[in-house]
Image (cartoon, grey):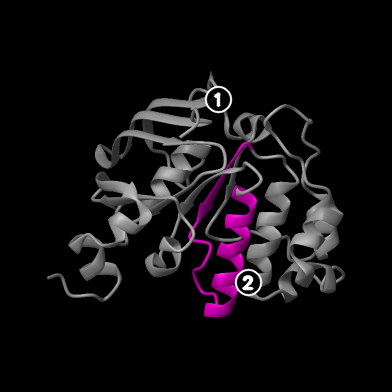
Amino acid sequence: MSEAVLDVRRLQVAYAGNRALDLAALAVAPGEVVGVVGANGAGKSTLVNAIAGWSRGAPRVTGEITLAGTRVDAWATHQRVRAGLVLVPEARVAFGSMSVDENLCAAFAALAEPGRRVYARDEVYALFPRLKERRNHLGSQLSGGERQMLGIGRALMMGPRVLLLDEPSIGLAPKMVSQVLETLRSLAGTGLAILLVEQNVRAAIEVVDRLLLLERGRKVLEGPAREVGEDPRIAEAYLGATAA
């Protein structure tokens, strides 16, 4: 594996003294898709939110987060985004009173730098033809899958070094899940590093390179996707299989 573009060490997150996450290490290399799975409350969203520097509450966050060789854990969220650490949240936020076109134009213009590809709006439309068809529709008129495409497209226009996604398949029809995840795999093929929190373990295994299992805020399993998928803890709990 090439040198990591995202390197996380000793990351701890606590709310009112209750530890929600305690992760010793996590790394994502350029062109790699790392999947994070686990039960509800396992700390998956807490992980990507902490890396992005964003939270609904006021947690105490400690640890080291390094992006392309630079420590960013002391940076504000907007500074991390401008450096290329971009989160597509579970809520798939779209401005409901703005058209698809206007939503995409709302993405700030990232600087062209080594290790970053800044997508133009037409490139986003080429990646997601459905968005081009709906370009004049309001964000409030989009389906869940279309909002997910819009969130990813807007993130790509910010020139991410690392793309963080929180539950991109939640609430989507199976066909749309496949389309979104396959698109993420193709983006990794261009060299983009992706950290994917995913509820649909069966679908995730098809597109991620490595899989990480969280339980009660701790990493209990990590390895190549196919190998981890055969582990009884994954097979029984998430794939509906019976361990031998």
In the rendered image, residue 132, in percent from the top left (x then y), is placed at 83, 68
Residue 144 against residue 219 in the figure, above or below: below
Residue 182 lies in magenta, yes or no? yes
Q: Amino acid at mark 1?
A: Trp
In the rendered image, residue 48, in percent from the top left (x then y), is placed at 46, 45
| Quadrant (top left/top right/bottom left/bottom right) for the C terminus | bottom left
Q: Quadrant of residue 185?
A: bottom right
Q: Which mark is residue 145?
A: 2
> Which label's residue is closer to the chain start, 2 or 1?
1
Residue 54 lies in magenta, yes or no? no
Badge 2: residue crowd in 10 Å (few <14, some 14–19, many ≥20): many
| Quadrant (top left/top right/bottom left/bottom right) for the N terminus | top left
Q: Left or right: 155 with respect to 48?
A: right
Q: Quadrant of residue 193?
A: top right
Residue assigned mark 1: 75
SS of the residue under disc 1: loop
Q: Left or right: 121 with respect to 65?
A: right
- Disc tally is 2
**For the point 49% across and 59% down, which residue is it?**
207
Camera-nearest residue between 77 and 6: 6
Camera-nearest residue between 135 and 60: 135
Residue 21 against residue 68 in the figure, above or below: below
Q: Which of labels 2 and 1 is toward the front?
A: 2
In the rendered image, residue 166, in percent from the top left (x then y), is placed at 49, 55
| Residue 188 visible in rendering | yes
Q: Left or right: 101 with respect to 9?
A: right
Q: Amino acid at mark 2?
A: Gly
Q: Residue furthest left?
A: 244
> What range is drawn magenta here?
161-188
